[in-house]
Structure formats: structure tokens, C-alpha cells
Amino acid sequence: MTDGPLLIVLTGLPYCGKTTLARALEQEGATVVELDHINRERGFRIEDGVPMAEWPETIRQAEVRIAQSGAEVVVLSWVNPSERDRQRWRDFASARGMRHLVVYLAADQELLDARRSAAVAAPDRHMLSDKVLQRVQRRFQPPTDALVLDATWSTRKQAELVTAAL
């Protein structure tokens, strides 16, 4: 990549496939920073939600990891529920001379419910409580200025489209 480092802000509702796409992009050489992973490292059970007062520290740790990564492409994987959240990451990237791209994995409720049900059987997946899931869904604002990917598309197709957009 010759245009300088890039921050991909990966957004979408829980169970839309953000982690799966992030891992596919990681296989292509991107560095992945997942806020859920940071919260688990900090001792929080994602299933029960993270106290609002703790999010600034999680975000600070994500910023440090991105800034210190030295990577050409960093994928920030988080719900990024509001336009204000996404703008914060755009501003962060711009302040560090990074380009940025918001990638939105769009999924309908039927698909999200099916994937959530499937996650119950997966030992490596966390299940959000109904209360946490409903809170996230109420707060989520779909982005209007993003590369929109259909969550039903194959991960390979999604990754190819992200790579082509770079």
C-alpha cells in the first residue's frame, strides 16, 4: 500500500460477522484490534455487558494498540454503535496521518437471530444476554457513509470487496 496506513472501522450489529471478516482480513496481512477482546482481557464478561464507565479505558487501550502496531492496515472490530463513535475513530486516524474506511456489515434481524442461535453451540463464541443485545440494537445507528457489505455474502466475497476498496 503506497498511500499510507489505513484504519478500517468495521461496524455492524452483534452476530453480523465482524469477527469473521476481521480474521479473513488478518489472513491478508491486516492487524486486528477487537474491543471485545480488550474487554475480555480486562476481566469483563462480554455476555453481561461492560459498564459504561469502563469504555473510555477500553477505547484508550485500542488507540494505543493501533498507534503502536506500525501496520499498513489495521481493522478495528467493534459494533461502533453511533455515528459519534465512528467519527471519533475517523478523527483518531486523521490525527495520526492514517486513511480510514468505515465498513458496515448489514444484516436483517432474521439472519442475526439465526447466527445468535448457532453461536450457542460454538464453544469459542460468547452469547450476549437478551438485555445487552437489546440495548446494543436500540443504540445502533447504521452508517450512511460506509462501504456496505451484505452479511449473507461469503466472507471471501466480503474480504475481496474490502480489499478492492483500498
Image: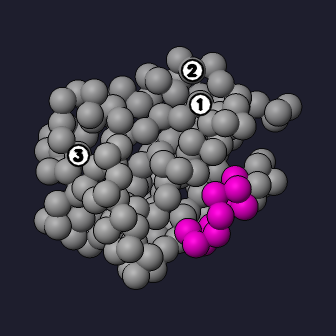
- Decide: is 35 above or below 106: above
Instruction: Name the quarter where the N terminus is drawn.
Output: top right
Question: In the rendering, which numbered label is found on residue 69?
Answer: 2
Q: Which residue is mark 1?
A: 31
Q: Which residue is mark 3?
A: 46
Q: CA distance from mark 3 to mark 2?
A: 25 Å
Earlier-in-chain disc, 3 versus 2: 3
Earlier-in-chain disc, 3 versus 1: 1
Color style of the picture:
one colour
* Residue under the point 44% across and 76% down: 111
Res 165 quadrant in image: bottom right
SS for callout 3: helix
Q: CA distance from mark 3 to mark 1?
A: 22 Å
Kind of residue indicated by mark 3 = Ile
Is residue 95 in the magenta section? no
Horizontal and vertical percent position of residue 6: 67, 37
**Residue 3 visible within the image:** yes
* Residue under the point 76% across and 55% down: 160
Kind of residue indicated by mark 2 = Ser
**Number of disc labels:** 3
- Decide: is 98 above or below 138: above
* Residue under the point 43% across and 38% down: 34
Q: For this rendering, which residue is in front, 156 or 86? A: 156
Q: Farthest residue toward the right? A: 2
Q: For this rendering, which residue is in front, 26 or 33? A: 26
SS for callout 1: strand
Q: Residues within 10 Å of mark 3 (few under 14, many from 20)?
A: some
